[in-house]
């Protein structure tokens, strides 16, 4: 006969698991996280799951309203735009453009910012100050304006938009990394590692990065919502993705002239942008809340 | 008449699994003008007890007592807010790290003026501002800070720890309390400064007949400045009595172990020999032993110790143990 | 039985005040000091904050470079800045047990690091050594897979002690390591340190301002004030007949009678 567990077994989770438990707690955060994962899945599987291609013109179904209104057709679930392209397919492809590119942009600027920030924290004196502040001039210019200037210099196109936004997001990561690393250096276990003869790289990898990664991630989610809005805004201005590409901002710009006769061509991309920004913000809030709760306990 | 009379106070923590009894049936009595020490190591619940008396615990702690009398009034019948109102008029508290307890963005003078009791100011409203300043300066003089001009204009980080603690005591004195609870006031200080603070507290006790409840984890330090001592272990009441009784003839094995680990007892043993200690360590909240919580570590523990011991009283020396050490002294 | 283990010759440290560009002010944190330490003996360094005792500890363990002087162990001089050479012989235990252990590593990984960097043992031998060391400090071998936040303050100090002795050093510096512990845990830790001193022939340098511990635990004593050595000699002699006014004041304030 199996013995019942008389003693309550105590769970001792690792710091990461603790963070996950705290993160899971508020239901709103889990909903946001679910939406976030849903968007990632859409972005990755865009070409496979869309019913039609995003540029295919169905000339006999121009400006069809969404399927729930009287004139709608269920084979075009969210209607079509003025060139007969299916809105649903365009929106899903747009996920991989706007949302997917925003993730790539944030990861790239995170990587570059962390490298510069770590170098700045490891050195002292003028070299450190220079590394810390030379990108601050970028912080003083509003990000959208800077992106417009860069695109004006390099020419319009999705690639240049991506470079512009990466450049705009780097300085905040430099600052956060440098401050976090400097704070960690003051702790005794880093000194103990150094006294054991560890090289600077080893100290960074084992002693410092695991402890600052959460701060970086919460900053990254903040940066991502800014990145989504910037990509969409540049697309809206016509400086980002070229016209046939189904980027949400470009779709908005396309639909503006038709607003009175076909409002769905405007509000559908708008809702998509809203949805992705809210999901990102909820995840970021949840992460910050979990960090705070873990620090208090 | 007893100033404060607490019997069987328990504080329960509501957790997700089951409620934990952080403080288990503790008694505390204090007379007017008495300096009492409350000694216990970390995890003994002494700070919780002090906070429960003043009434600043959150909702997750449930406080319950058989008797909680303040100057003869029964406080358990009142609601929590009424209790707090009565207590906060006459009880003040000072804490461990004084610099962290002061607002770092305003000067000391402004903070003292905030603490001054409004009822003690008389006169029209335009005179009150001047009176407030005077009251703040009087408070600083009471705690022994003669050059008040520099002190009033400076920020907390510009003063030393000892001065900050004096300022905290001054703020606590503003409402003329009858009881001052000092929660480890000198834990983070050098020994010369500790002496200053304790002397100040002793002089306040003598001049104003103010009772002091001195909470500390260092038994020997406390014995120089107190009339009577209560010892707690892991949330349970262990022993209470006058200072001489506790230090010279401890009845409980835990108090005996505390006395043995103090420098005065170790004076006589040879250099670099092993010290007398209790084996094991303090139980954590999630795994509290049943009955007498010293049981797993006590050298005199027997089967009976699984049940909580009753309090025995020998000439106002109370001890909560099934097998007190009384016989080894007689 | 006891031979001179560590020799400190003319060690001093001055800081240049960074606030001034021209006419830089030099702050002498520690004036030149020389002393010897024997095996199986404990030296206590007593002083208030700002007296230079932490600076001396950091100079001895190699965390800071000395302005003048050098340190010799068994005749070999230490090269300043060369940690690998020094860490096999001189180790340090810090005061605040909360920040001495990396919160995201298990105890095994924590104790593995100095072994990986300084010895040539393979994985099995390292594992075995970690088990033995944990047993020596009074913890169980199963504690290897726990994280630091699961331990109490006293246990964290034992883990710091394990990290210090795992490389079998000759000198261990205790930088106020016992100050933050409760009295009963402090007594246990002192017993443990005394046992280890007997077994391994260690020399301890105890930095403390608690004269009770100093009297019980140390053989020789040094009193520092503002970077200068006021007294140096056998503990019992200094505590019975203090020569300097500062020492007298210190003894009086702790109401210490011998």
Image (cartoon, rainbow, N blue to C red):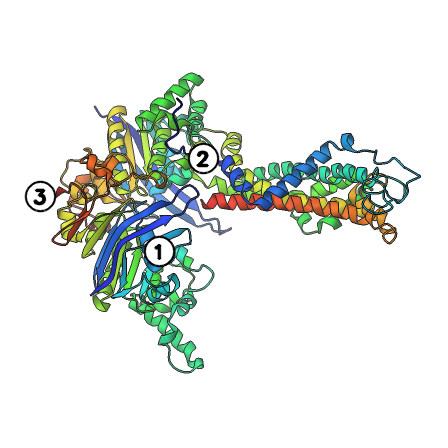
Q: Judge the density around disc 1: few (<14), some (14-19), many (≥20) Cα neighbours within 10 Å.
A: many
Tell me the mark number nearer the camera, choosing from 3 and 2. Answer: 3
Q: CA distance from mark 1 to mark 3?
A: 43 Å
Q: How many marks?
A: 3
Which of the two residues, B200 or B45, is positioned nearer the viewer here? B45
Q: CA distance from mark 2 to mark 1?
A: 30 Å
Gap in angstroms between the C-alphas marked 3 and 2: 49 Å
Report helix, strand or loop for mark 1. Answer: helix
Disc assigned to residue C52 = none
Q: Nearer the viewer, residue A51 or C237?
A: A51
Q: Please name the residue shown 26% across and 31% down the image.
A: C192
Q: On what subunit does the disc labeled 3 rest?
A: B
**Frontmost residue, C167 versus C129:** C129
The local crowd at label 3, few if under 14, some if 14 to 19, many if 20 or more residues have their Cα within 10 Å, is: few
Q: Position of residue C116 (x, y in %)?
A: 45, 23
Q: At 74% from the left edge and 49% from the top edge, which residue is drawn?
A: A144
On the image, the x and y values in percent for residue C145 come to 42, 28
Is residue A269 something one can see in this rendering? yes
Identified at 53% across, 33% down, the residue is A204
* Numbered disc in front, either 2 or 1: 2
Which residue is tagged 3?
A: B329
Label 1 chain ID: B
Q: Which residue is mark 2?
A: C102
């Amino acid at each position: 006969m199996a013995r019942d567990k008389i003693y309550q077994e105590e769970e001792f989770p690792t710091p990461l698991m603790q963070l996950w438990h705290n993160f899971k707690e508020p239901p709103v955060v889990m909903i946001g996280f679910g939406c976030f994962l849903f968007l990632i899945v859409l972005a990755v599987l865009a070409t496979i799951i869309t019913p039609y291609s995003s540029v295919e013109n169905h000339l006999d179904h121009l400006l069809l309203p969404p399927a729930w209104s009287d004139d709608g057709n269920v084979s075009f679930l969210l209607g079509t735009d003025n060139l007969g392209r299916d809105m649903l397919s365009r929106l899903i492809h747009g996920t991989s453009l706007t949302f997917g590119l925003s993730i790539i942009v944030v990861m790239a600027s995170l990587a570059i910012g962390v490298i510069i920030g770590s170098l700045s924290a490891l050195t002292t004196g003028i070299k450190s100050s220079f590394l810390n502040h030379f990108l601050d001039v970028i912080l003083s210019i509003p990000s959208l304006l800077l992106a417009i200037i860069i695109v004006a210099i390099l020419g319009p196109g999705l690639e240049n938009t991506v470079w512009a936004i990466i450049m705009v997001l780097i300085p905040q990561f430099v600052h956060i990394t440098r401050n976090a690393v400097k704070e960690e250096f003051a702790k005794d276990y880093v000194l103990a590692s150094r006294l054991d003869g560890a090289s600077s790289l080893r100290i960074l990898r084992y002693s410092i990065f695991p402890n600052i990664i959460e701060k970086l991630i919460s900053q990254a989610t903040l940066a991502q919502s800014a990145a989504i809005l910037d990509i969409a805004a540049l697309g809206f201005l016509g400086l980002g993705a070229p016209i046939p590409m189904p980027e949400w901002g470009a779709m908005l710009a396309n639909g503006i002239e038709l607003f009175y006769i076909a409002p769905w061509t405007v509000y559908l991309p708008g809702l998509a942008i809203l949805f992705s920004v809210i999901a990102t913000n909820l995840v970021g809030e949840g992460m910050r809340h979990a960090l705070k709760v873990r620090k208090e306990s | 008449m007893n100033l404060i009379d607490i019997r069987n106070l328990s504080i329960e923590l509501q957790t997700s699994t089951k409620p934990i009894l952080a403080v288990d049936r503790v008694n505390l009595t204090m007379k007017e003008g008495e300096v009492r020490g409350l000694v216990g190591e970390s995890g003994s619940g002494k700070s919780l007890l002090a906070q429960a008396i003043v009434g600043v615990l959150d909702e997750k702690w449930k406080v319950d007592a058989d008797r909680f009398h303040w100057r003869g009034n029964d406080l358990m019948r009142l609601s929590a807010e009424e209790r707090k109102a009565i207590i906060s008029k006459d009880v003040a508290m000072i804490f461990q790290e004084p610099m962290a307890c002061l607002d770092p963005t305003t000067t000391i003078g402004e903070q003292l003026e905030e603490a001054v009791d409004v009822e003690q100011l008389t006169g029209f409203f335009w005179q009150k501002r001047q009176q407030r300043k005077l009251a703040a300066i009087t408070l600083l003089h009471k705690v022994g800070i003669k050059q008040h001009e520099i002190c009033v204009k400076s920020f907390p980080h510009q003063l030393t720890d000892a001065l900050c603690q004096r300022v905290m005591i001054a703020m606590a004195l503003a409402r003329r309390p009858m009881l001052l609870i000092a929660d480890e006031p000198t834990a983070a200080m050098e020994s010369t400064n500790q002496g200053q603070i304790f002397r100040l507290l002793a002089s306040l006790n003598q001049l104003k007949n103010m009772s002091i409840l001195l909470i500390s984890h260092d038994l020997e330090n406390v014995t120089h400045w107190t009339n009577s001592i209560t010892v707690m272990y892991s949330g349970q009441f262990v022993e209470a009595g006058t200072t001489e009784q506790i230090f010279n003839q401890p009845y409980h094995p835990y108090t005996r172990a505390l006395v043995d680990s103090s420098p005065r007892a170790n004076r006589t043993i040879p250099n670099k020999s092993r010290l007398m200690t209790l084996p094991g360590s303090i139980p954590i909240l999630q795994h509290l032993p049943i009955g007498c919580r010293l049981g797993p570590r006590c050298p005199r523990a027997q089967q009976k110790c699984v049940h909580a011991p009753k309090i025995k009283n020998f000439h106002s020396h109370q001890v909560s143990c099934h097998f007190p050490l009384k016989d080894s002294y007689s | 039985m006891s031979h001179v283990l560590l020799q400190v010759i003319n060690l001093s440290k001055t800081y240049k005040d960074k606030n001034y560009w021209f006419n830089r002010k030099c702050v002498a944190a520690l004036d030149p000091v020389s002393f010897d330490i024997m095996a199986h003996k404990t030296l206590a360094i007593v002083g208030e904050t700002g007296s230079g005792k932490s600076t001396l500890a950091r100079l001895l363990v190699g965390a800071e470079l000395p302005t003048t002087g050098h340190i010799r162990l068994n005749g070999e001089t230490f090269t300043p800045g060369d940690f690998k050479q020094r860490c096999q012989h001189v180790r340090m235990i810090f005061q605040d047990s909360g920040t001495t252990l990396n919160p995201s590593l298990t105890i095994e990984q924590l104790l593995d690091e100095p072994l990986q960097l300084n010895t040539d043992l393979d994985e099995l031998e390292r594992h075995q050594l970690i088990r033995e060391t944990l047993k020596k400090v009074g913890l169980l071998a199963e504690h290897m897979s726990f994280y630091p936040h699961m331990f109490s303050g006293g246990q964290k100090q034992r883990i710091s002690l394990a990290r210090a002795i795992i490389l079998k050093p000759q000198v261990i510096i205790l930088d106020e390591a016992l100050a933050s512990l409760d009295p009963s845990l402090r007594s246990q830790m002192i017993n443990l340190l005394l046992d280890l001193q007997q077994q391994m022939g260690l020399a301890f340098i105890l930095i403390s301002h608690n004269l009770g511990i100093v009297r019980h635990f140390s053989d020789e004593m040094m009193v520092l004030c503002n970077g200068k050595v006021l007294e140096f000699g056998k503990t019992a002699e200094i505590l019975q007949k203090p020569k300097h006014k500062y020492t007298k004041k210190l003894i009086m304030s702790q109401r210490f009678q011998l």
